Every structure is written in structure tokens, then in C-alpha cells.
Image (cartoon, rainbow, N blue to C red):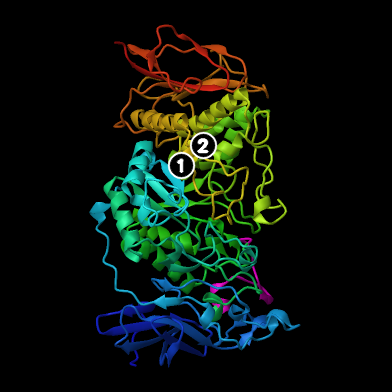
Amino acid sequence: MRSGWPNPLGVHWDGEGANVAVFSENATRIELCLFSEDGRRETERLVLPERSGAVWHAYVPGLAPGALYGLRAHGPYAPERGHRFNPNKLLLDPYARALRGRFAAPDACLGYDPASPEGDLSYSRVDSAPAMPKCVLTDPAPPVPDGERPDTPWAETVIYEAHPKGLTRLWADLPRELRGTYEALAAEPVLEHLVSLGITTLELLPVHAFADDRWLLEKGLVNYWGYNSVAFFALEPRYFGPAGLAGFREMVRRLHGAGLEVILDVVYNHSAEGDENGPTLSFRGLDNAAYYRLREGQERFYRNETGCGNALDLSHPYVLRLVLDSLRWWVVAMGVDGFRFDLATTLGREAHGFDPGGGFFDALRQDPVLTRVKWIAEPWDLGPGGYRRGEFPPGFAEWNDAFRDGVRRFWRGDAHGAQEMAERLLGSAGTFDREGRRSWSSVNFVACHDGFTLADLSAYDEKHNEANGEGNRDGHQENWSDNCGEEGESEDAGIRRRRARRRRNLLASVFLAQGTPMLRAGDEIADSQGGNNNAWCQDNEVSWIDWENSDAELLGLVRLLSALRRAHPCLRQSWFLHGRERAADGAPDVEWLGLEGGAIDWSDPDLPGFCLLLRESAEAPAHAPDGERMALVFNRSPEAVSTRLPAPGGGRAWRRVLDTARPEASPAACIDLRQPVPPESVLAFAAGAVP
């Protein structure tokens, strides 16, 4: 070996050998371990000879792509001081580009002796290598050309949230060996479906390599959602298709070719190593005190703001560097177009708490690569002061759970539901309109991977999570759902009709609202999870989308809604609407009318609905196109009403373009301003030139 260089971090081949660079500021020695082709036998253990600051490094001539390796770290085993070094534990390189094998969950991966009365203070001498996947040295990946990216503007973005396996696992038109793989996501039938929906952006649940929780395996379950990452550069191998690693890049290329972006749901807030009783897989063994947020004065224990046992410390420069290097890798080498940050509040935690001007946000906003892609924050974690919706810096969009709950409560008939619904339809301006943020900052949804599906929202009053093995104690306790008269599946024709209309109304609320709409994969066909609102451990028919029993009528409605959004710019404005006077004509940019026309009584807690009149925002610049007028009517009452539309003016006439009570109805001109509104329905009218 030679000295090598401290940069870049990780193990990288240069055509003749590999440079090895590993961060650890508290280790006393780092070893590179090489393995046989099958990964079962450790063939060499090489001590990295040089240290530059906190980086240990070496150059290994002849080490070539395909080599299997791992790391071992020597240093103090002193949990009370935050140190958990144990060279008996094989560790993953945090910068590994690929893994071979699966995580087993035996006691061998624990840094302590589970049989000892001292618990995690004891020391394990068992070699964990047989139970660990091995890192794979890979060829350098060429950058993805920028010209291949769709670069869809935020205002035109429609997100489709999908599980990388569950989306296609039951897709009958795909070859069996392709179903549930990365490659299947861009197979021709899938592409045709996605394009027909009018979505612009495919958001994938975690694809970083992750580990299954031991207690789940003991119950015969797995971590299906994958929010348990441990290797931030490596793809999860269980979704590989025939082309392996190359299949992911090809999938991204094909999606780009169809005009679709790819966003990854990424988990940088915690790792799969859990709390002090968890396994030693990578970060804990390399430098526990540097990678994790530990309790001050009680460094044996972790600050668990994530609810997952630990929290990564992005205030440490090398942990922050790891995350930024990982993000750039997925953009430059794999071609992705953005990221949804799980429990994003944790990423902004400094010593004094959450800080929107903290190191991670500052670094992200000045990065020349990462500023070109989309960022979405899940704006909360489980720590003190963790709920931060609306407080992320400009440039971020945020999951808006208030939209989800407010829309559900409105259609369920809750008191004051109409008042909250009004706020949500205008992009939650009271929350997001600050510091120059745009209305697309609100990511609007009524269902996502976590919680009831759209179909189950209208079929279950209670969650049914018995299959998860936790006595139905897990999952959201308040879902704002409504079974429409009978729990679960129903043969009653009236209940079934009401449920179908409720689903259409919920989806119409998402697509007609200002902000960025997000559709959970499967909701376009009324996919059900049988009332399970926390299917994170169900890698089976509970979670896989049931394409065979698709609701064709609902699918047609989703296609209509996305087409309406594309056709009418006033439904996807970048600027917020506040009812301010427009310079062009002196008219307010938004008006509220009662269901039957005239003034609206906002003091009525049982207000059954309203008519919303939209124009171009008063904040829009002078060069922005104008002339759009739309009237949206939301009636949650079980009674039909007759609304009076205001005269559109300017030589225009109203045309009905949506009626969720009659989704099959063709658009029709409105001869009379007085228009019928069916019970429990949404109507949309567009103003156009008089024929």
C-alpha cells in the first residue's frame, strides 16, 4: 500500500488501484478488510497507514471494481463517553456505491454481549462479518447529461408518490422477473399509465440500502417502506431487476424521455443502527460520538428526536459533508431531479434547536449542483419543538398535513370545516406566504404512503392494523375518515355510490387547490389496504397495488382533473391570492360567494360550502398572461342547491368543465347564470369567449 489521499472520501478506483479514505476523529486505527468473491471469507486485513486530520487513508494498487470489502475501526469502547469502537464488527463504508448480500439480524452484529447483565456496557468479541453485507467497489459512474432532465417548473408539477416495488409487483402486463424492480418503473405499460395520468414527477419511497428491524423479522415481517437507511450511496438490492445497478440509471433515463422527473424520498435524519441496544453496522462503529446526537452529560444515550432510536448530527462538518456528497451523487451520477427529506426538522437541528438558517440549509442553498433540483421537506420530527410547517427556507416545498386533515374534515361534515377548507384551497397562504415563497410551497394531498388510502378513507371509521403484530396500537389514531354508513366492504349500492362520490370530491379538492398536488400511487384506481393505516411492514398484497380490480371511473376522473389543471393556469398560480385589487381591472383576484350566490356567512360553523371565483393574482407581474376566470363550487351538503354564478364579464360565458356527481358528463355551455349543484359534489366552471 501507499499513503494515498484524504479526498475523496470512500473507496474509489482510478484504473490502476483504489484510493481509500475514511473519516473518524476518535478512532486509533482503521482497517480495510477484503473478502473472497462469494463474500464468505475474509482474505486480507489492511491497516490504513496515514491520517490527515480526521481522515484515515491509503492507496491499494490492483484493487479493482468488483472487489468486496468492509471496514473495522479500533478505539475506545466507552459508552458512557459516547465511544463504541469494536473491531470485531465489520462496518459498511458510508460512501459505498453498492452492497452485496442482505443484512442478517443475529446477535453477532451487536457491539455488546446481549447475555451480559451489563447490557450495552459489555463488550462483544464475536465477529459480525458473516452476518453483514459487503461493500462492492464499483466503476466510476459517468455524469447524466443535464439536457436529459425535464426541469418541470414547480407551478406545473404534479407528484405521484409510489413504492419502488409495490407499484408494479402485481402488474399483470409485465414479465414476472421484472415486476417489483427498478426497471419495471419505466416499462412501457407503466410509462403509458403515468403519462396518461398527467403527472409530471414520480416520487419514490426510499431506495437507499436499508436494514430490516430485528423484531420485525422475528414476527415474519419486514421493513417494507424502507425508512431505515444505512448506506446513503447504495441502492437497495432487493429491487434489482435483470440489469442490476444499471437498471436504475436506465429507469431514470426512460422516465426522463417520457417527460417525467424522479424524486427520491431520502432518510438522513437517523440510521438503521437504532438506540444503544441496536446493532453496530457502520456509523456507530466508525465514530459514534461524531455521527450521532448524544444526550449532553449522558453520552451513553441518544437524542431520539426521530422516534427511531437515534438522530444523525448534521451540525458536525463531516456528517453534513456525507449528506451533501450523497445528494450530489444521486443528482450527478444517477440523474434524479430532487429529494423529499423525511423528518426534515432533524436536518436543521443545531445545538440550540431547529434553525432554518442552520448549516444544512445554508450549505444546500449555496450548492451549485443541488440548487438546480427540487426540495420537499416533511416539516416535523418527534423532538421538542419539532413541528415546523411553513418555517423552512424559501426554495423548499413542504408536505402540508393541514391540507390533508382540513379537506378530510370538510367532506366528513365537521363543524367549521368550510372555513378551514377555504384556507387550504388558496395554498395555505397564512402559513407559506412569507420571505418571497410561492404558492407551490404547499404540497397538497389527502392520502400518502402513511395512513389510510383514498379508498379506505371512505370505507373505515377505525384503523385495522392487526396484521402488524402490535395489537392495533400502531398507526394514526385520528384519521378524519368516514365509512359512509358501514365499516369495511359493503354490498349496499347506496353506500357504494356515496363512497365513490366522496373519493372523487377528495381528489378534486387536491387538483383544484393552489399549491402542488400529490397523488398516492393506487388512489387513482381506488386501491385499498383493508383498513390498515400503517402498512410499513406489509410486503405483500396488503400494500401492493391491486391493478386487477381497478376503478375505471375514478381513473378517468384523475385524468380529467390533471387535464383541467394543465389547461387552466389560474388553478396553478405561482403567486398567492388574497382578494387584493388587480391593477388590470380593479377586480379582486379571489372572491367568495355563498352556495346560492351572494354574501357568505363565515360565522356559520355548519357552512355547507361556497363558490370560489378565481382570477390571476394581484401579485403577478405585468408581463404575466391574464384573462383566466374560473368558478369552483364545493357543496358538502346532502341536499342539492341552486347557485348563481357571477357574470364573467369581458364578453365571456361560463362553461361547466367538471361535475363530480356526473364525472362522465361532457363539458357544457351555461346558458343561464343560475346553475344546479348536486348534493356532495364539486363543480368547476371556466369562462371563455362567447361562441
Rendered location of residue 231, percent (x, y)? 46, 69
Q: Residue at x 45, y 29 (%)?
A: 553
Extreme-right residue of the structure:
117
Query: Which residue does the numbered mark 2 point to in the structure image?
Result: 526
Q: For mark 1, does the 10 Å Cα neighbourhood hold few (<14), some (14 to 19), or many (20 or more) residues?
A: some
Quarter occupied by residue 559: top left
Kind of residue sitting beneath label 1: Trp
**Which region of the structure is painted magenta?**
288-307
* Tag of residue 301: none
For label 2, the SS is loop
Q: Nearer the viewer, residue 135 or 3?
A: 135
Q: Is residue 167 magenta?
A: no
Residue 547's disc is: 1
**Left or right of residue 430, residue 395 in this image:** left
Task: Tell me which residue sits at (58%, 50%) in the image.
Answer: 388
Towards the viewer: 110 or 359: 110
Q: Quadrant of the N terminus?
A: bottom left
Residue 300 covered by magenta stretch: yes
Mark 2 residue type = Ala
In which quadrant will I find the C terminus? top left
Residue 28's place in the image compared with 386, above or below, is below
Q: Is residue 420 above or below residue 315?
A: above
Q: Are marks 2 and 1 in contact (CB under 8 Å)?
A: no
370 and 638: which is toward the camera:
638
Is any atom of residue 617 visible in this view? no
